Image: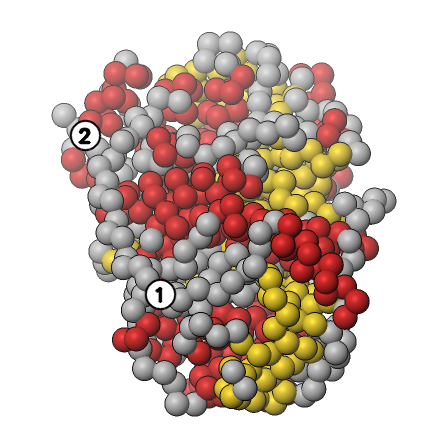
Amino acid sequence: MIDPNILSRHNLTPEEYDLIVRLVGREPNLTELGIFSAMWSEHCSYKSSKIHLKKLPTGGKNVVQGPGENAGIIDIGDGRVVVFKIESHNHPSFIEPFQGAATGVGGILRDIFTMGARPIALMDSLRFGPLENPRNRSIMDGVVAGISAYGNAIGVPTVGGEVYFGEVYSLNPLVNVFCLGLADKDKIFYARTEDAGNAVLYVGAKTGRDGIHGASMASQEFGEDTETKRPNVQVGDPFKEKLLLEACLEVMDRHLIVGIQDMGAAGLTCSTTEMPAKSGRGVEIDLGLVPQREAGMTPDEIMLSESQERMLIACKPERVEEVQAAFAKWDLDAVAIGRVTGDGRLRCRFHGEIVVDVPVSAVVDLCPMYKRPYEAPEAAPRPTETGRYPLPADWNGTLKRLLASSTIAEKEWIYRQYDHMVQTNTAHLPGAGAAVLRIKGSSKGLVMTLDGNGLYAHLDPRTGGMIAVAEACRNLACVGARPVGVTNCLNFGNPEKPEVMGQFKEVVEGISEACRTFEIPVTGGNVSFYNDTEGVSIYPTPVLGIVGLLDDMAKAVTPGFKAEGEAIILLGETRDELGGTEYLKVIHGREEGAPPGLDLERERAVQETCLEAVGLGLVRSAHDPSEGGLAVCAAECAFHGPGGIGFAIDLQGGHRPDVLLFAESQSRILVTSKQEDIAKVLDLAKERGVPAAVIGRTGGASLKFSLEGRTLIDLPAAEAKTIWMNAIPEYFKISGETENGR
């Protein structure tokens, strides 16, 4: 009988161990047990989430590759494809913020160029605890610095993202990284070994002891021993990755290889099992041939190290020398460590002794899939009883406080650390809801966005999942782009808790329903469970990365007001709902109630109205009200405009002033149009049954809101923008810290 302590260290249950014994046909040795531990971890196997992820729509006429590969692929015409994926690096970023975030960037980049695509843009979705806490400031500073250091050095622009703050993320920051690449449709590569007899080459950086059991660490709760897990965090080298990227793209372009896979989670174990499993083959390797940067490494350390900047390549035997010569030109190792076999087994030798001999299908395909018990979340009361919240005495002060909220405040302090113009594809600067990228040699453009609201999903998981999709698509509509594909990063607590599995089930079903409404496929993504520390789970936080296509780059719209005297038109309507709003959180100190309701058909009608109006050249600017509601949305439009153009908005009655100003009702877009185009925009809305009204005019130097002739807010635009711009940097001046926390 195996020692229970050994099973506990490998994060395996007795039942899982018994299954391993049956599949292998004997008791596994410790190296083999480590292989199963990594590949059967939640992080690698998705054993708790698969049953629910199958509900997501994954097919479509333009889908070239859906879930199951390193990244998803969508055909965008003209012989080109987009390759994209989102991944989490939450646990490593809590333990070691700089390296955790940096290697998260490196890993997602490899997922993209492994497919034969050149990465052209990065985005990141971040969650931190309140910045009043010095430790949270330190974590945020390290994460931002890590993202910046890796992305800037390798030459891939970070073009935008989102940052939220909440107490629930103090012990579990979230770091989700989204990458987009471009490739020729006829030059895509997959994680395959193909035929028996093919050579197996290890390429890239040498193997060290960093990151061992990283996948297992990401599949456990954290406790008081968090610091002891620091060796599980990988160490990245973006300059080595740049060489690896160019070398891999070269051998792909020359068709020297037949398959390739990143040594990501679980390291060499992952690539030596998944690649042959997908080809119905086996692999035999000699661990003594693996390039190592540390002396005395054991077989299990070599197999489970998650050292960065490494790939496994399969090629025909006669091509080995050409591949090696190509990598030598880039000063990289390319060592033939084994061959593809036809027996379906992973066989590893070390100093002449067989130390691993297991069926690859057992490791990759036969992990148990769990239908974990779940509890349906209790529905939050709807509608929120707004009468319980006293009206502010100072409306100017209320807007100032919201603009200074760390979630709403401008993030220039963060994104100015990123090189967002390298490769010269970035058409719109960071700071808006979506990033716009040129496709060189084409009039088309690509748009990418990230969205997700953990508080919404906490209060109503299904609605929260739907809103994450709807708002991301709305961000694209505001630019003038239609969504073509989705990748998601689903961040949750411990799946062994029925309440967490209930949240997960509801969120996935909400995402599925919304994606079907918008007719967009989910091409892959990532599930990050066990975001718990000392028994406290994060809010369920679905993050949606959506890629859109612009037929004509020249028609792209930005959020900033363009000129004085233009009409401000609200598409959609404001409803009496304050639950889950930033206003309720910041002004009243409450995270409660039901989040905004969502009618998917109305949402689609609003977006189609905006898309048609943009396509006809009727829209000068477009922005969707989200955190902070209409008041913050209009203020941001003013801030993004040239010369601080103000506005005067006359709110439509029917609700309390705080609802009209700060409700986060969905299915709304604020657009501006020239005087001669107002009627055309309103007619387009009417044709689709979308409520629409002119609510104000741009102009002046103030942000003005009135209700029934009574002025509520009259705030100098310059003063408001200063508050919005400087709120986050102010936190880093506390206790003598410099602005960047260093």
- For badge 1, the amino acid type reads Gly
Quadrant housing the N terminus? top left
Image spot of residue 558 (x, y percent): 70, 63
Image spot of residue 699 (x, y percent): 71, 82
Q: Nearer the viewer, mark 1 or mark 2?
A: 1
Residue that extends furthest to the left in the rendered view of this protein: 1
Q: Residue at x 57, y 89 (%)?
A: 715
Q: Which mark is residue 14?
A: 2
Q: Secondary structure at mark 1?
A: loop
Q: Residue at x 43, y 90 (%)?
A: 394
Q: Nearer the viewer, residue 129 or 231?
A: 129
Q: Secondary structure at mark 2?
A: helix
Q: Is residue 39 above or below residue 694?
A: above
Q: Nearer the viewer, residue 166 or 143?
A: 166
Q: Nearer the viewer, residue 318 or 628?
A: 628
Q: Nearer the viewer, residue 184 or 240?
A: 184
- Residue under pointer 1: 579
- Quick check: can you spot residue 378? yes
